[in-house]
């Protein structure tokens, strides 16, 4: 295990929301494997985090700790450690992706492709939690695509407050749709898996599903939204300029695309 994968019990607690006291209690009840001990410090890793999230999910589905411990004991006995850790790590790694990085002011402008950005826009980005200012002159972009969208929309003339409000509303609707998608996955895949006693034969399929669900959902959402934006633009153009003008504009856009091909 590499050093950057290790977590102290306090770090594991912060990442999962489980108190250090409960983490120790879970270990004593056989719900959580012991940490790797280096010197006098116990280190945890993504497999432990996945196990805690697994326990949390099962509790939300109505299982008590004794039942979970018994089920996990039987489950572990029926498969290899590598398969188990692969599944439990998938519970964590599939749903979290940190692509943030730090920029200087010049690097920030280069990333956006803009000559300058206002303090008002930066403040809005911080409020939306897509940008962080760890120290003077340093910027950490937390959600690159959202931050870029905010900056470009403002650059083309939309007021900062309006852009911030609309993107925040859009994010909320996207979260609602994501919640619905995950609920469908839980209802038709996860819940039957748990109800059947988490049979070993289904573990590879479920692990693969956890790994693939996020990229599949992302590609599908991008494709559907891109098509929806095209329809919305066409409707807006037709409503404002008439269908004939809209057709001519589409032709001009198509010629522009050919020129840049």
Image: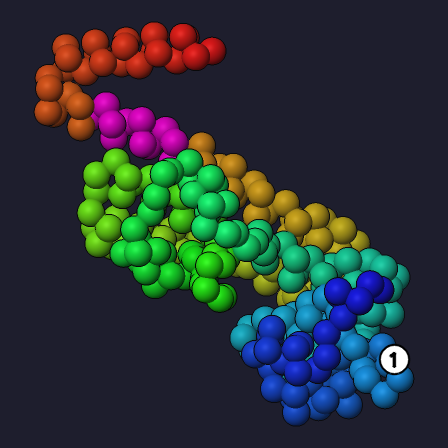
Q: Residue at x 59, y 47 (%)?
A: 213
| 181 falls in the magenta region | no
Q: Is residue 226 magenta?
A: yes
- Residue under the image location 18 percent in, 28 percent down: 236
As helix, strand or loop, the secondary structure at mark 1 comes to strand
Residue wearing tag 1: 38
Is residue 125 toward the left or the right of residue 215 in the image?
left
The part of the image, by quadrant, that contains residue 224 is top left
Range shown magenta: 224-235
Residue 141 place in picture, x, y as percent: 48, 54
Q: Position of residue 47 (x, y in %)?
A: 75, 67
Is 236 rendered above or below residue 17? Answer: above
Which residue is rendered at x = 15% and y = 21% of the image? 238
Q: How many marks?
A: 1
Q: How is the image coloured?
A: rainbow
Left or right: 105 as drawn, with respect to 44: left
Q: Residues within 10 Å of mark 1 (few under 14, many from 20)?
A: few
Q: Is residue 224 above or below residue 238?
A: below
Between 240 and 105, the residue placed more toward the observer is: 105
């Amino acid at each position: 295990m590499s050093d950057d994968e290790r977590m102290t019990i306090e770090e594991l607690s912060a990442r999962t929301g489980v108190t250090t006291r409960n983490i120790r209690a879970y270990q004593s009840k056989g719900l959580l494997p012991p940490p790797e001990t280096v010197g006098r410090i116990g280190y945890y890793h993504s497999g432990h985090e996945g196990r805690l999230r697994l326990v949390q999910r099962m509790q939300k589905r109505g299982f008590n700790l004794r039942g979970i411990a018994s089920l996990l004991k039987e489950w572990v006995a029926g498969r290899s450690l590598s398969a188990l850790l692969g599944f439990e790590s998938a519970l964590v790694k599939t749903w979290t992706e940190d692509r943030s990085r730090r920029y200087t002011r010049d690097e920030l402008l280069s990333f956006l492709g803009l000559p300058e950005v206002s303090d008002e826009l930066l403040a809005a980005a911080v409020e939306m939690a897509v940008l962080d200012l760890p120290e003077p002159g340093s910027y950490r972009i937390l959600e690159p695509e959202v931050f870029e969208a905010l900056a470009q929309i403002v650059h083309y003339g939309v007021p900062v407050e309006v852009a911030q409000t609309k993107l925040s509303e859009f994010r909320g609707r996207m979260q609602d749709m994501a919640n619905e998608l995950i609920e469908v996955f839980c209802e038709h895949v996860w819940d039957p898996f748990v109800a059947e006693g988490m049979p070993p034969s289904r573990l590879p399929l479920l692990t693969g599903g956890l790994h693939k669900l996020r990229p599949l959902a992302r590609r599908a959402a991008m494709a559907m939204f891109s098509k929806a934006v095209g329809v919305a633009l066409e409707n807006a153009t037709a409503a404002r300029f008439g269908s004939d003008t809209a057709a001519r504009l589409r032709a001009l856009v198509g010629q522009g695309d050919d020129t840049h091909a």
